Image: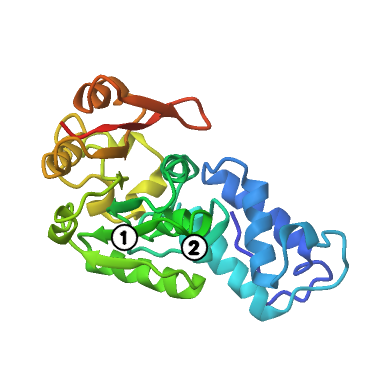
Amino acid sequence: MAAIDVQSEGPSARTVGAILDDAAERIAAAGVDDARTEAEILVADALGVAPSELHVESAGEIDGEAAAKIERNVQRRVEREPMAYILGRAPFRRLEVYVDERVLWPRRETELLVEVGTQLPEGARVHEIGTGSGAVALALLNERPDLRVTASDLSPEAAEVARENAERLGIDLEVTVEEGLPEEELDQEIDLVLANLPYVTDSTIFERSPEIQREPKIAVTGDCGEDGLGVIRGVLAEIPSGWKVAFEHDTHHGPAMREMLGDEANTRTDYMGGERVTVGHAP
């Protein structure tokens, strides 16, 4: 498929409609669902407007700088780079968080972890393990500023992203670099431990969308083992018995997670109806 010719002098070569049609066609050819919507987002981003403000039928041409940015970003999407990385941001609950290749981009299903936290009593203590971009902890503090929330990640690069997001959003969040639950948190009872840890196996990652292979492997597969629960088991073993926990996991992990987290454990379904977050207590 031909790329956008940013040098062309044709009367409609750089109109919004022409560039949008070309972008949508190329993104669709790369196997991306809802390619038109994604093309509109990329074109609107380059023009500094909302997708709803695009004037597709306008005869005016897009300037060369904007057209070149669109071309670069369309090509990145054709190569199946996640949209969140291309845009440098992603919506999450009521926030927009900044993301790049140092962290996972936050998915809609992960918002279930925030929902669990919002149901805590006033002043409760929460710690998030594997915070990544900080999206979960920051969204929870944004919606429940009365809670005392801390976060950690074993990746110094991820912790840096979380701190950057906290600063941008003006939310006070302490982020430490730790593997598992920080030792200082063991000295005081935590009302809820949240975690979205790696649960994709090395053998099944290639069965998923190509975008996941562009994300940091340490956050996707880690040391999951054959069933994908290796990292979760390791972290759970470090959490004091009886502490309340909520783990995100793959949709087929529900029964195993309920078995690990006790008789009162319950699993919440995501927007697609899959079992995604299990709430229970450390054994």
Looking at the rendering, which quadrant does residue 282 occupy? top left
- Image x and y of residue 59, in percent: 88, 68
- Image x and y of residue 102, in percent: 32, 64
Amino acid type at circle 1 is Thr
Query: From the viewer's perspective, is residue 113 above or below residue 271?
Result: below
Query: From the viewer's perspective, is residue 58 above or below residue 242?
Result: below
Which residue is painted at 65% across and 70% down in the image?
46
Q: From the image, tell me which residue sits under label 2.
A: 97
Residue 3 shows up from this direction: yes
> What colour scheme has been applied to the protein in the rendered image?
rainbow
- Image x and y of residue 60, in percent: 85, 72
- Considering the image in quadrants, where does the N terminus appear? bottom right
- Considering the image in quadrants, where does the C terminus appear? top left
Q: Disc 1 or 2, which lies upstream in sequence?
A: 2
Q: Which class describes the residues within 10 Å of circle 1: few (<14), some (14-19), or many (20+)?
A: many
SS label for mark 2: strand
Residue 81 shows up from this direction: no
Dot label at residue 150: 1
Q: Is residue 146 left or right of residue 227?
A: right
Which residue is painted at 67% across and 48% down in the image?
36
Which residue is painted at 30% across and 45% down in the image?
191
**Image depth: mark 1 or mark 2 in front:** 1
Which residue is painted at 87% across and 65% down in the image?
58
